[in-house]
Image: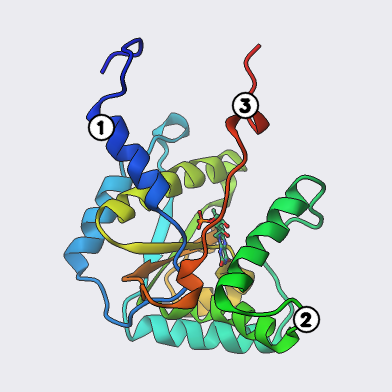
Amino acid sequence: MTAHSAHPGAAFAELSELYQARSSARAFAPEPLPRDRLLELFAAAQRAPSWCNVQPWRVVVTEPPTTGRVTAALVAAAQSQPAAPEVAFPADYPSPHLEHRRACGLALYQAMGVARDDKEGRQRAWLRNYQGFDAPHLAVVSCDRRLGPYAYVDLGVWLGYLLPAAQALGIATCPMASIATYPAVLRERLPISPEDTIVFGVALGVADAQAAANQCRTQRDPVSANVQFV
Ligand SMILES: Cc1cc2nc3c(=O)[nH]c(=O)nc-3n(C[C@H](O)[C@H](O)[C@H](O)COP(=O)(O)O)c2cc1C
């Protein structure tokens, strides 16, 4: 396809379809993915561009039984320790971010049948994060802290390659900042360099298609809310 052709080609249509079809999975079947499949996925994402091609993403992928050991420790930490992420979480969500955030939470709780005033239900749903939503694999993503904030941009681009590629391979995903809340738990159990900052995780596996949490779909604003031509 050329940039000025009237109709987008098949490649754009397929990519667009992948973008539309992908959503975060929050309930997984226990079966692990074959190592070859995972390698295929990470090899595709490896083509992501980065500042000066530094390719700063450092990724530790857990497989059972390590996944279970890590998530058990994360759940215990979430129940007993204050949050201590290495990249500060937003202290505040000014408008319109607050509205977006609320709508996203509401969509999930509605899908799960958790009522607004059901404190225990919300607590249980929140703890599921640290359980990695029972995914058989957690990818813990970090980068060398000496590269500064632009390396985070590179990690985001890499994630943007990974998620649709996973969708194309039939691999369900959930990007997870929550598991970065307890970095000491991850560092104790996984080979993460002291020079690296843990930025986020990604749960990977086969989605439990029937699970209520996986019926959640989020909306997007029109393009004009984010993009202006001058
Ligand atoms: C960097 C990043 C971190 C995220 N962390 C979490 C998380 O900790 N827990 C969670 O349930 N979802 C998490 N998400 C998923 C978002 O909530 C989700 O992408 C968003 O609501 C849009 O929904 P969709 O992915 O289904 O399109 C994260 C997404 C990103 C990109």
Distance of label 2 from label 1 (alpha carbons): 46 Å
Left or right of 55? Residue 112 is right
The residue nearer to you, when weighing 190 against 227, is 227
Residue 67 x, y percent position in the rendering:
39, 80
Q: Which residue is mark 3?
A: 227
Secondary structure found at label 3: loop
Secondary structure found at label 2: loop
Examine the rendered structure and indicate whether residue 161 appears above or below residue 229.
below
Examine the rendered structure and indicate whether residue 23 appears above or below residue 51.
below
Q: Mark 1 or mark 3, which has the lower sequence index?
A: 1
Secondary structure found at label 1: helix
Q: Which residue is mark 1?
A: 11
In which quadrant is the C terminus drawn? top right
Q: Taking the image as four quarters, which one is ligand 1 found in?
A: bottom right
Residue at the farthest left position: 36
Using a 10 Å C-alpha cutoff, classify the residue at mark 2 as few (fewer than 14 neighbours), some (14 to 19) or many (20 or more).
few
- Quadrant of the image occupied by residue 147: top right
Q: Mark 2 or mark 1, which has the lower sequence index?
A: 1
The residue nearer to you, when weighing 72 against 102, is 102
Q: Amino acid at mark 2?
A: Asp
Residue 161 x, y percent position in the rendering:
38, 44
Q: Which residue is mark 2?
A: 117
In which quadrant is the N terminus drawn? top left
- Quadrant of the image occupied by residue 115: bottom right
Residue at (59% x, 76% y) in the render: 184
Distance of label 2 from label 3 (alpha carbons): 37 Å
Distance of label 1 from label 3 (alpha carbons): 24 Å
